[in-house]
Amino acid sequence: MVARAYTVAFEGVTARPVEVQCAVSPGMPAFSIVGLPDKAVSEARERVRSALAAMAIALPSKRITINLSPADLPKEGSHFDLPIALALLAALEIIPKDAAEGTTALGELSLDGSLVPVIGALPAAMAAAEADRMLLCPSASGAEAAWVGACQVIAPAGLAEVVRHYTGQSPLPPAQPGEVTSALQSRCLRDVKGQERAKRALEIAAAGRHHLMLVGTPGSGKSMLAARLPGILPPLTAAEALETSMIHSLAGLLDEGGISRTRPFREPHHTASMAAIVGGGRGAKPGEISLAHNGVLFMDEFPEFPRTVLETLRQPIETGQVMVARANAHVKYPCRFMLIAAANPCKCGYLSDPARACTRAPICGQDYMGRISGPLMDRFDLRVEVPPVAFTDLDLPPSGDRSADVAARVAQARAIQADRYARDGAAHQNADIEGALLERVATPDNAGKNLLGRVAERFSLSARGYHRVLRVARTIADLDGDDAVRRAHVAETVSFRLSAQPDAQ
């Protein structure tokens, strides 16, 4: 007789169902696991054996075979311990077989039978809900999994509680969802003295999810500006929060099962590897661009990143997803993020500062910024030069709008976009529109068309650059509450688009 339980194997954010079959048959005593397990799964037999021994359950002197089906799907991770133990307990008739078959389980076992939290409880709960099964997971993972309301989640602390629950001795109550958190933003845009043009670019970028490049001398406030971007972004919607949390669950970043409504803000160091940025490594884990999904990826000292890392950003920026292809895994992750890059104008940093002229100008700047390829630079919608702030300006009182005021305008602009694209379903923000939809909603008036035509001819805008100008102009019109894209909106967009081009000086 074969007993069954169910679990999942992770392929990116997708949890693929796995059937755990257990057969106890006559023969030489053995405990084998088949079905393409990795080393961690193969070692589960020792953890399961010890956990059962801690409960005074002795394995029979028979041949125990565990099959993980489908057999050609790679199985990785320690979360297979609990479903293997569950199927074995059902095969030994310690718990009812039908109860085990109605359960999707995941969890790592300690030698004393206690359950250790594992990653991926949230996507596993989604898979269990689709299969109309209950989810069994460690108590520390229950609050995270319970966010999937369509799935009943039972979260025991150890294997003994599992047995008592299924035998009816001490049923466990369903787990409750964790807290919804929203980080308080104490950094305000008014803390930044001067830099009004950069603040305006930050507002436009936030309103339409446009990519922004900040170029300026050391200490001019580039990082300070970027750090205040989360304070003007609207909170995640319920769907976005769940989608983002699934990625963070796979990375083990959810804090005590809570789901955050604050948009991610990731700032990797410029020594980060390609696998850390794009994803990969053992198990093809999500990288920084996926962890920044629905949020912000801030890359300071942008030209200092390895050239290969920078070039891998080109395709994810366009498509909003990344395929991590490895010899034993092809995993797709969503990565619809806003890229904020900061860079000095040259290696020494003072190419654009007349008071401290670069000693190797202009070669120093050409070599340094030349590390950013033309196709990658073309993907930045907004480019802003951040000049140094005079010492006298530092003593002036705060000026400009508070972050809360800017956030209100950004939220209003995004609400306009949500209403506009709700029927199409092909876009989320202005940065996503393309094709016929772009022509319909972002075509400027005659004066705007004439201006854009002259600019495109004078500065040889690429087709991508031309379309990005239209998208940003549409965002500026939304901030102004204007249904039409006018010449003033195109002119402001062009001023940001060309600010980093030598011919525009």
Image (cartoon, rainbow, N blue to C red):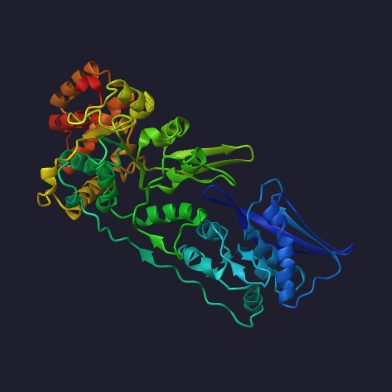
The percent position of residue 193, horizontal first and vertical second, equals 16, 46
**Image side of residue 194 versus residue 159, left or right:** left
Residue 333 versus residue 237 in the image, above or below: above
Q: Position of residue 104 (x, y in %)?
A: 61, 62
Q: Position of residue 480 (x, y in %)?
A: 15, 42
Total labels drawn: 0
Task: State left or right for residue 16 relative to residue 373.
Answer: right
User: In this view of the protein, can residue 384 be seen by the observer?
Assistant: yes
Left or right of residue 79: residue 504: left
3, 227: nearer the viewer: 227
Quadrant of the drawing holding the N terminus: bottom right
Closer to the camera in the image, 18 or 56: 56
Quadrant of the image for the C terminus?
top left
Asked if residue 152 can be seen in this view, the reply is no
For the point 67% across and 57% down, the residue is 19
Of all residues shown, which one is farthest toward the bottom? Answer: 169
Q: Residue at x 59, y 46 (%)?
A: 282
The quarter holding residue 459 reads: top left
Asked if residue 453 is positioned above or below residue 76 in the image, the reply reads above
Residue at image location 80% in from the left, 71% down from the top: 59
Residue 103: x percent and y percent? 62, 65
